[in-house]
């Protein structure tokens, strides 16, 4: 069939347009691949999560009633990862050694909390010994040193001294200790 | 050629182009083999080049291969981190730190930013950046995070949390462990995500649909409730501090086109090394799944979506690093092998699926692991380091110049640290292992064993680490790349980054 050139041209153009638009009309583009806005991907608040008000006091300390002159271990989240040794209470401080038994990699964070109790067992207050990532030790002015414990693996040990706050000394008859913070590399 | 003919030819050409395009659309619907829908990113913590070689020789012999070594694309990644306050490479205030920790390394591949040691998904100036897993989740992918460490530890946490200090893990906030005033200038309010313990973030942000590993001791009753409120099936119980078991995991069945959100922690701390589980089959720890088991189940739970967006799964073999810190060569090798079995699971899935990219790499090398020549010793055992005196030879006359040779000093070390030598406190030299190439009867810890291994230290080193890739787009790992490049490689494969 002979079409005049003009008509052929129109027909072929129309055909081309139809062919070009066919996939768009009939073949769905699928899911878009636009990357999400990065800032919208980060959860920056957690409804229902109470903001921390400070360093933790183990709730187990509140219910303890250590015998006069003694230092008792209060339960904490990491009790299967360390041991206490040579715990003792003097008029001005709680002393002892804590040995991390779960890992021998670098100790990043360790906090020993001492609770001070009166004769009825009431928790009067707390003080802390902290080993921090950069090797600083914060323990109320007492002395501490890291020492390797003899054994198959060289577990990290810390001798700690936690001073009894001056204002409590006259009433403290016993103490408790716990580890609420412990992180190894 | 007349005008009609030209127009007809043009129309035919156009039709064939359109036809091809339509065929392409149809093929994409059927499954274009070049289209990535899933990424499985496996990370051997502390696994340097020698860890791979030694594990290969130990278990498969000189001409064998670990599974990861069968991946077709191989490169190496640079692991250095930066100092607090540093800019990024190329910026005027860039200040590198040549030896990274796991946190800054994780931040590199999860966010694309170099940061300081101890930072997670924040840059060296303290700014948070979205992680690949967060972007994937936001874009509609299903997500999973598996580790043999505590799930709050650096590698898994680097995908699911933003903290200034990796020690801010939980369950409790501690200012010393969470704040970093060197970076922020002053203490941040405790409502700020960057000082919110990692466990609290993981339990509430829904970044990973499937979470498996250790670290139950980091989570509490409030975390358990938050997880359940988001639809997670919680195996074991953070509230009761009851760990999940492999039997619990086996009872969970994947449902098609369902969320299948699962939270399963199998130990209060890190998971247990394979040797201990093998030797104590009746222990509670023996009920922990292997990293391969967790990988298999995670894939089953995540691979339930139709369409272009599948899943993104990160798997960490963490105990390679833990045992390298301990210079425990036997377990370093066994944990590398266990991790390689997880690679096998991922690769088998990818080969069948044809739309999955698999990346295998490490965050850093740990402990300067080395294979030394049979019968030799290390500089640390020698009277002096190797001799270097030859002033007449211009090739040899640099400093340091030593007059004595580095012969073995029996006072410094009496030899092999495993086998019969394990009980001699004077030993710190090589550990020796039999390989499949050795004659029958050759024992680990004997001078006859052919694989002699030593450690330089008990800490990380700055060596580049291997990276292996499988699947479309994985050729981008070939060559010498930055660890931050892995963010772009994975992000672009999933089309969640530009």
Image: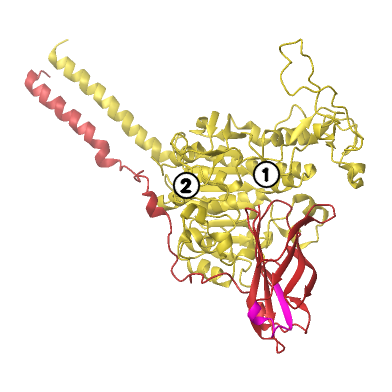
Name which quarter of the figure residue B170 lies in.
bottom right
Residue at image mark 2: B132
Image quarter hosting the N terminus of chain B? top left
Describe the element under mark 2 as helix, strand or loop: helix
Q: Which mark is residue B230?
A: none
Q: Is residue A173 located in the magenta-colored stretch of the structure?
A: yes
Q: Nearer the viewer, mark 2 or mark 1?
A: 2
Quadrant that contains the C terminus of chain B: top left
Q: Is residue A89 left or right of residue B170?
A: right
Q: Quadrant of residue B18?
A: top left
Q: Residue at x 61, y 49 (%)?
A: B295
Q: Which region shows up in magenta? A: A166-177
Chain coloured red: A
**Image x and y of residue B213, in percent:** 63, 56
The residue at the point 61 percent across, 33 percent down is B464
The answer to whether residue B163 shows anywhere in this view is no
**Pointer 2 with pointer 1, Cβ within 8 A:** no
- Looking at this view, is B272 or A56 the one in front? A56
Front residue of this view, candidates B415 and B137: B415
Q: Chain of mark 1?
A: B
Relative to A74, residue B249 above or below: above
Query: In the image, residue B475 lies at what x, y percent?
Result: 51, 30
Nearer to us in this view, B194 or A122: A122
Chain with yellow colouring = B
Q: Give x and y (percent) for residue A7.
A: 8, 23
Residue named by callout 1: B339
Residue B127 on the magenta span:
no
């Amino acid at each position: 069939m002979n079409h005049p050139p003009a008509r052929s041209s129109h027909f072929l153009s129309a055909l081309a347009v139809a062919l070009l638009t066919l996939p768009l009309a009939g073949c769905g583009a699928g899911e878009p691949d636009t990357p999400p806005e990065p800032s919208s991907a980060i959860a920056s608040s957690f409804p229902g999560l109470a903001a921390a008000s400070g360093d933790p006091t183990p709730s187990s300390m509140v219910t303890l009633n250590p015998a006069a002159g003694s230092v008792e271990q209060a339960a904490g989240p990491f009790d299967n990862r360390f041991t206490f040794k040579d715990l003792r209470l003097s008029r001005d401080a709680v002393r002892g050694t804590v040995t991390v038994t779960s890992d021998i990699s670098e100790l990043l964070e360790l906090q020993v909390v001492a609770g001070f109790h009166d004769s009825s067992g009431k928790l009067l207050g707390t003080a802390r010994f902290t080993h921090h990532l950069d090797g600083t030790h914060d323990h109320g002015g007492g002395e501490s040193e890291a020492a390797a414990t003899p054994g198959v693996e060289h577990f990290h040990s810390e001798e700690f001294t936690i001073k009894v706050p001056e204002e409590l000394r006259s009433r403290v008859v016993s103490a408790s200790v716990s580890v609420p913070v412990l992180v190894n590399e | 050629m007349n005008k009609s003919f030209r127009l007809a030819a043009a129309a035919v050409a156009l039709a064939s182009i359109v036809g091809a395009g339509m065929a392409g659309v149809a093929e994409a619907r059927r499954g274009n083999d070049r289209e990535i829908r899933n990424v499985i990113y496996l990370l051997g913590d502390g696994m340097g080049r020698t860890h791979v070689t030694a594990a290969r020789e130990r278990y498969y012999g000189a001409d064998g291969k670990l599974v990861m070594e069968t991946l077709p694309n191989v490169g190496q990644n640079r692991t250095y981190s930066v100092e607090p306050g540093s800019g990024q490479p190329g910026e005027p205030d860039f200040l590198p730190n040549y030896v990274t920790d796991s946190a800054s390394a994780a931040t590199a591949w999860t966010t694309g930013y170099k940061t300081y040691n101890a930072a997670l998904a924040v840059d060296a100036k303290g700014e948070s950046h979205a992680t690949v897993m967060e972007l994937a989740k936001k874009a509609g992918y299903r997500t999973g995070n598996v580790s043999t460490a505590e799930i709050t530890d650096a590698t898994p946490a680097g995908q699911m949390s933003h903290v200034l200090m990796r020690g801010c893990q939980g369950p409790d906030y501690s200012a010393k462990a969470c704040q970093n005033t060197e970076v922020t200038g002053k203490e941040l309010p405790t409502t700020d995500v960057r000082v919110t313990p990692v466990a609290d973030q993981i339990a509430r942000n829904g970044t990973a649909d499937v979470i498996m590993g250790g670290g139950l001791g980091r989570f509490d009753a409030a975390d358990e409730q938050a997880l359940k409120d988001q639809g997670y099936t919680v195996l074991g119980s953070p509230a009761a501090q009851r760990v999940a078991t492999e039997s619990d995991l086996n009872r969970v069945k994947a449902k098609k086109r369902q969320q299948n959100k699962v939270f399963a922690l199998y130990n209060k701390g890190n998971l247990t090394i394979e040797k201990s589980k093998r030797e104590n089959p009746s222990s509670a720890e023996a009920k922990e799944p292997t990293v391969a088991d967790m990988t298999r189940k995670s894939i089953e739970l995540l691979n339930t979506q139709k369409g272009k967006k599948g899943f993104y799964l990160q798997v960490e073999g963490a105990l390679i690093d833990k045992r390298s810190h301990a210079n425990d060569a036997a377990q370093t090798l066994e944990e590398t092998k266990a991790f390689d079995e997880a690679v096998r699971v991922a690769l088998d899935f990818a080969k069948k699926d044809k739309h999955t990219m698999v990346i295998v790499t490490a965050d850093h090398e740990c402990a300067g692991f080395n294979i030394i020549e049979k019968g030799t010793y290390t500089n640390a055992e020698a009277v002096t380091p190797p001799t270097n005196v030859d002033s007449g030879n211009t090739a040899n006359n640099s400093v340091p110049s030593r007059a004595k040779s580095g012969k073995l000093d029996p006072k410094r070390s009496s030899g092999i640290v495993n086998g019969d030598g394990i009980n001699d406190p004077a030993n710190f030299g090589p550990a020796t292992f039999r390989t499949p190439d050795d004659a029958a009867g050759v024992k680990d810890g004997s001078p006859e064993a052919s694989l002699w291994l030593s450690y330089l230290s008990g800490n990380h080193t700055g060596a580049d680490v291997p990276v292996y890739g499988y699947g479309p787009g994985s050729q981008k790992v070939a060559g010498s790349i930055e660890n931050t490049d892995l963010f772009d490689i994975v992000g672009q494969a999933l089309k969640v980054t530009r």
